[in-house]
Image (tube, rainbow, N blue to C red):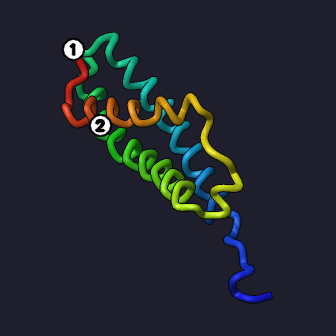
Amino acid sequence: MSSGDRTPGPSGGEVGNARLTSLTGLALLVLLFLEGLTLLSLHHLLTVHLFLGIVLIPTILLKLASSGYRFVMYYAGSRRYRALGPPPPLLRLAGPFLVLATLVLFGSGSSC
């Protein structure tokens, strides 16, 4: 077996990227749900709201990075990422708008 025939272990490559993206998405769902709950009584939960907002920033950046990496690898012609196929059409259309909206929302620092 030549070095070019080696495949990354279970924690690397396209499988690792998919796992990282999925786990980060799950973490975002939980954090965003909790952040939404703080809005019910923002006056009393402002400290928790701000804390969760700060925790969300690196989580969102990680999700954008892992999704962006797959995007770049797919459109750069990586055989492994091409074999996984393109994202579903709805996600391909909505993706840029969701990324822009996320960056605007968290870049503005406002929640209300």
Q: In the image, residue 7 lies at what x, y percent? A: 71, 73
Percent across and percent down for residue 67 are 49, 48
Residue most toward the right? 1
Q: Residue at x 50, y 38 (%)?
A: 27
- Is residue 93 found left or right of 98 in the rendered image? right
Tag 1: amino acid: His
What's the residue at 40%, 17% (across, down)?
37
**The residue positioned farthest toward the bottom in the image shown:** 2
Position of 7 relative to 32 (above/below): below
Quarter of the image that includes the N terminus: bottom right
| Image spot of residue 14 (x, y percent) | 63, 59
SS for dot 1: loop
Residue that badge 2 annotates:
103
Residue indicated by mark 1:
43
From the image, state whether disc 1 or disc 2 is nearer to you.
Answer: 2
Front-most of 36 and 103?
103
Closest to the observer: 99 or 36? Answer: 99
| Residue for point 52% across, 38% down | 25
Q: Please state which of residues 39 and 83 is positioned toward the viewer in this rendering.
A: 83
How many numbered circles are shown?
2
Residue 30 visible to the viewer: no
Distance Cα–Cα, label 1 vs label 2: 25 Å
Element carrying mark 2: helix
Give the vertical position of 46 relative to 106 (above or below): above
